[in-house]
Image (cartoon, rainbow, N blue to C red):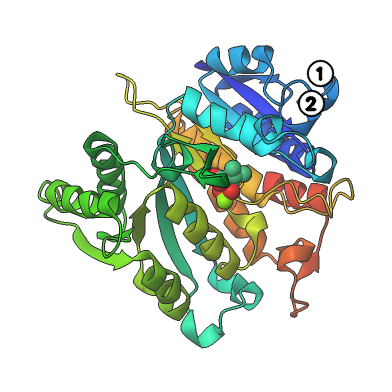
Amino acid sequence: MSKHRIAVLPGDGIGPEVMKEALRVLESVAGKQGFEVVTDEYLVGGAALDASGNTTPLPTETLQGCEDSQAILFGSVGGPKWEDLPPDIQPERGALLPLRKHFGLFANLRPGVCHAALKDASPVKNSLIPEGFDVLCVRELTGGIYFGTPKERREENGEEVAIDTMVYRRSEIERIAHVAFQAAKGRRGKLCSVDKANVLQNSRLWREVVVEVSREYPDVELSHLYVDNAAMQLIRYAPDYDVIVTGNLFGDILSDEMAMISGSLGMLPSASLGSPSEGGCNFGLYEPSGGSAPDIAGQGIANPIAQVLSLAMLLRYSLAEEAAAVSIECAVEKSIEDGFRTGDIFSGAAGEKLVNTSEMGQAILDRL
Ligand code: IPM
Ligand code: MG
């Protein structure tokens, strides 16, 4: 029996509540599929700040625990309680960004899926998404303006100036382009690269390199959009898109837009991956696309589906347990078909059953 080890970082807000459901699903699916997963839980974000007297949102034991694991299942971090701390130790900047950088998690996969059955939850008109949509956003995650230097505040001629630098190296663009082309190959064979090549130098390099890499993938149809236009086109007709590849900042923005038009942030998982090891398996961090939702935390009403689907991605990409991943995805699909709805996706239509977090978890468990 294969034995895996993962680090579990529930974090803040709704993180612990939805994580509980994901862990129930994990235990059941592992039993059914005949493998074992050791889960070690660590503090992160505001929870770690509270426990450390506001010294760090990413304690050494947490980082060490992640290093000793095959993957990280992450909940969410942040909340009003920690917003006034110095930026470097705030939960988001002080925990998430260092984790991404430390483990070289350059490829962020964010599926934006609107199930046909949930299109009423989308703010986009039904006529524009007759069958829902399924777009995969591949976001570069360890470069660009998030990490480029200089990144500082200084004084120039007696005036305060703040500087961030957008840098992309050829090698960084090449490796994310390969991830995106591979993904498109396994899907509907269409890739749209998003940049701002009409203004930015690094976007011009981005486009050149993506075109070069495309020669290795003659069966994938490549197109390009400037980011402002992409923001429009996604709303105009999302079903036209299959895979989108873009830099760190543009991907941050477009993936939120996609999440919004898909109906609920509570549905969307994400995977942040590094380079595959020799066995073909990736270390990765898996987290819901939505945040810690402090407004509904502690009430037991959050949608656990994003966390459960993040677990499915973890099983697929980091543990190579494809059958378990598929079984979870099917169980989620079936729960939706059978009418189970947490508040965020409840429209009141006939056949829908309004449920809380653990009831949704149970519905998924019952359908594994
Ligand atoms: C995301 C988030 C993060 C980002 C923040 C919390 C630093 O918005 O994962 O999209 O900007 O990458
Ligand atoms: Mg974001």
In what quadrant does ligand 1 lie? Answer: top right
Extreme-right residue of the structure: 299
Rendering coords of residue 117 (x, y %)? 59, 72
Kindly identify the residue that appears in the image at 37 percent across and 73 percent down: 229
Q: Could you say which disc has been placed on residue 52 in the image?
A: 1
Q: Residues within 10 Å of mark 2 (few under 14, many from 20)?
A: many
**On screen, 58 above or below 231?**
above
Q: Could you say which disc has been placed on residue 49 in the image?
A: 2
Extreme-front residue of the structure: 157
Left or right: residue 348 compared with residue 129: right
Left or right: residue 355 compared with residue 140: right
Query: Judging from the image, what secondary structure is the residue with disc 1 in?
Result: loop
Q: Tell me, yes or no, whether the two marked residues, 2 and 1, touch with CB atoms within 8 Å.
A: yes
Kindly identify the residue that appears in the image at 55 percent across and 22 percent down: 35
Rendering coords of residue 171 (x, y %)? 24, 34
**On screen, 77 above or below 206?**
above
Left or right: residue 49 compared with residue 242: right
Rendering coords of residue 283 (x, y %)? 45, 25
Tell me the kind of residue under disc 2.
Leu
Q: Nearer the viewer, residue 100 or 238?
A: 100
**Splitting the image into 4 quarters, where does residue 336 fall?**
bottom right
The quarter of the picture where the C terminus appears is top right
Q: Nearer the viewer, residue 84 or 321?
A: 84
Q: Is residue 325 visible?
A: no
Rendering coords of residue 346 (x, y %)? 75, 70
